[in-house]
Amino acid sequence: MEQNQRLRILAVETSCDETAAAVVRKETHEQFVTIERSIVASQISLHQKYGGVYPEVASREHIKQILPVISEALDLPLQTKGRLPDFKLHDIDALAVTHGPGLIGSLLIGTQTLSSMSLATNTPLIAINHLAGHVYASFIKTEATYTTPQFPLIALIVSGGHTMLLHMSDHHHYQLLGQTRDDAVGEAFDKVAKLLALPYPGGPHVSKLALKGNRDTYRFPIGLEREETLDFSFSGLKTAVLREIKQPMTAKVKADIAASFERAAIEALLYKTAKALDQFPVKHFILGGGVAANTYLRQRLATLLEYRTPAVSLHVPPTHLCTDNAAVIGAAAAFGPVQPTNPSDLITYARLPLTSH
Ligand code: KG4
Ligand code: ZN
C-alpha cells in the first residue's frame, strides 16, 4: 500500500451509538493524516428516553444509517433506497473498520458491511481497535498550528467505556500503564448526570452545570489517591455523590454537586497522569476519548503540564475528534504496521485489549 505517494482510506465506526464513515488521506512522507470527509450520524435522540444506549435500538439504527453514511462519505448519491450506488473503489487504497471493543450487534453492522465491500472490490481491509482510534485522533491535522506527536509518548484515553494510561514507544506499540478497576470516567459522568436528572449522554450536561457551582462545596474522594498504582477507580466517587442526593434539590445544590464531582473526577486523572510522567519521562503527551472534550480537563491538564513538565508537548484533538467518529479509525489504519485482514476471517469483539502490532 505504501508504495503510492499517498494512502486514501475509507473508514467506518459503529461500536456504540454513532454510525460514522470517513475518507482520510496520508501522504507517504507525512506523519499525520488529513480528513477529506467525515460523516457522523448520532443516535443520541433515540436513546435519550432510555437514559442510556439501548443496544437493540442501536443495531437497528446502524442498519438504517450505514449505507447512506458511507455513500455520503464517498460523496456518492444513494440511488436506490437501501443499496449502495454503483461504486468502484479505485481511489480508495484500503478499508478500515472498528472490530471492538463495543456492542457486538452494533460492531457487526460495520464489520459485515466493510467485509462485503472488501470482497466485492478486492480492497484490503484493516481491523482497528476502537481505543487505537482515540489515540490516533492526535495524528490528524485539522489546523495550521498542528504539531505531530513524537515517540516515546504517554496517552491518557478517557471515554464512556475506558480510562487508561498508555506508554507508546512507536506506532501501535502499546504498554498499558494503568486503567480503571471499576467504572470508566465517562460512565461516572453519565451516572452522576442521571442522579442529577440530566439528559443522556451526561458528560457535557454535568460539565455545563458545573460552571455554575462551587467546586469546593463537597470533598468527594479521589480514587486510589494514596496508592502507588497508576490504576483508576471511580465507583467510590459515584457512591459518594449518591449519598449527597436528597430530594428535592435546589438548583444551587445540583450545581455544587456537579462542580465538586467534576473536580474530584478530573483530579483523579491528573494525579495519575503526574505519577506516570514522573515514572516515564517522555516529551509528548496525548489526550483522547469522549471525556477529552471536557473543557475543565483540557484546561487543568494544560496547566499541570505547563508547571510540572514544561518540556512535554500536549496534544489534544478538537472536540469533534474526541467523541466517536470514523476519521480517527482511518488515522489509526494509516500508520503501519497494522496488517490487512482476510474479510472472511474478521472477528468482532465486545472486549478487546489494545495490543501491539
Ligand atoms: O469516546 P466516546 O464518544 O464513546 C466511547 O467510546 O465511550 O465517549 C463518550 C463518553 C460519554 O460517557 C460522555 O458522557 C463523555 O464521553 N463525554 C464527556 C464530555 N463529552 C463527552 N464527559 C465529560 N465532559 C464532556 N464535555
Ligand atoms: Zn469512543
Image (cartoon, grey):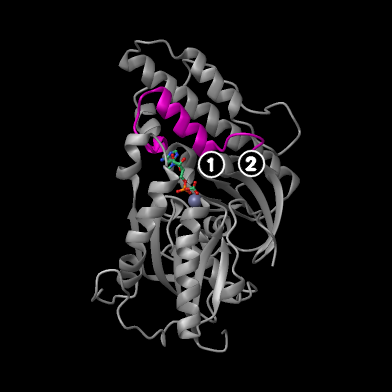
Q: Which mark is residue 327?
A: none
**In this view of the protein, can residue 140 be seen by the observer?**
no
Magenta range: 180-204
Q: Is mark 2 within 8 Å of ligand 1?
A: no
Front residue of 206/55: it is 55
**Of pointers 2 and 1, the one earlier in the residue sequence:** 2
| 181 with respect to 320 (left or right) | right
Q: Is residue 126 above or below residue 300?
A: below
Task: Find numbered disc 1 in the image and state the secondary structure of the residue it sits on.
Answer: helix
Front residue of 167/76: it is 76
**In this view of the protein, can residue 87 be seen by the observer?**
yes
How would you rate the neighbour count of disc 1 (Cα within 10 Å): few for under 14, some for 14-19, many for 20 or more? Answer: many
For the residues bearing labels 2 and 1, Cβ distance under 8 angstroms: yes
Res 282 → quadrant: bottom right
Inspect the image, locate mark 1, and give the three-letter code of the amino acid beneath it.
Answer: Leu
The residue singled out by tag 2 in the image is 273
In the rendered image, residue 138 lying in the magenta stretch gets the answer no
Res 225 → quadrant: top right
Position of residue 278 measured from the top left corner of the image (x, y, whole percent): 72, 43
Q: Quadrant of the N terminus?
A: bottom right
Task: Find numbered disc 2 in the image and state the secondary structure of the residue it sits on.
Answer: helix
Q: Residue at x 31, y 17 (%)?
A: 251
| 43 with respect to 280 (left or right) | left
Q: Is residue 191 above or below residue 2?
A: above
Q: Quadrant of the C terminus?
A: bottom right
The residue singled out by tag 1 in the image is 301
Position of residue 132 measured from the top left corner of the image (x, y, whole percent): 58, 59
Q: Residue at x 50, y 28 (%)?
A: 263
Position of residue 17 measured from the top left corner of the image (x, y, whole percent): 41, 50
